[in-house]
Amino acid sequence: MRFKNFFLTLSLLAAFLTVNVLSAQNDNAQRPSPAMTATKKIGDLAITINYSSPAVKGRKVFGGLEAYGKVWRTGANEATTFEVNKNVTLDGQKLPAGKYALFTIPGEKEWVLIINKEANQWGAYNYKKEQDILRINTKPGKNKENEERLKFDISDKGVVTFAWELANFAFAVKEDK
């Protein structure tokens, strides 16, 4: 009888630990590339960028981990999302209020910023060019120091800046009146 109770207790403990480990893997806070948000309110305009922030970890990112000339989710895990509550222009191109996926195509001399209608995607695996709303060609800058974690920042004037490893780029968001 003691052996049965011991075996039952041991089985329940193993099941409990298995469930805890599996649920921790689904917890966004436990991911190696944590979920981050950049947000700014400029008058009535609200800009929100949700992304996962991978680390460099000594790797060559652009032209290595992330190939030049290939569509990239611009982060890790789910596709990065870009959301505005008002109609805006991005570097002069019109974008209706809404939530979108933000992709890029990194290049050595030029990057392409892509705003895509399908916000809820995992990575860029199901990316479809025909769902693009707009594309902006931008010149990448070079960070003075290695930016270990990918980050987005939004200035008080609506300039969105991306930085990771030694690369950066920026684009302007303005309310379309």
Image (cartoon, grey):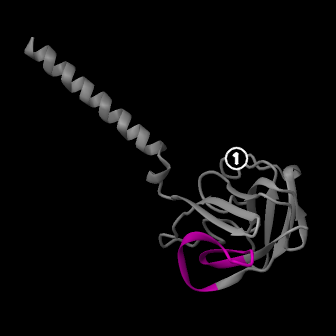
Magenta span: 143-169
Q: Tell which of 96 and 25 is nearer to you.
A: 96
Residue 76 appears in the picture as rendered: yes
Query: Residue 175: x percent and y percent?
Result: 84, 68
User: Dot 1: within a 10 Å radius of its alpha carbon, few (fewer than 14), some, or many (20 or more) residues?
Assistant: some
| Above or below, 11 relative to 98 | above
Q: Identify the residue shown where x is 70% and y is 46%.
A: 120
Task: Describe residue 35's horizontal placement relative to residue 124 as left or right.
Answer: left
Task: Describe residue 163's horizontal placement relative to residue 104 as left or right.
Answer: left
Q: Is residue 162 magenta?
A: yes
Query: Residue 106: x percent and y percent?
Result: 73, 70
State the quadrant of the N terminus: top left
Query: Residue 50: x percent and y percent?
Result: 64, 58
Task: Describe residue 48's horizontal placement relative to residue 55 as left or right.
Answer: right
- Residue at image mark 1: 121
- Dot 1 amino acid type: Gln
Q: Quadrant of residue 74?
A: bottom right
Query: Residue 143: x percent and y percent?
Result: 62, 84
State the quadrant of the C terminus: bottom right
What secondary structure predominates along the stretch shown in magenta?
Answer: strand
Q: Identify the residue shown where x is 67% and y is 78%.
A: 168
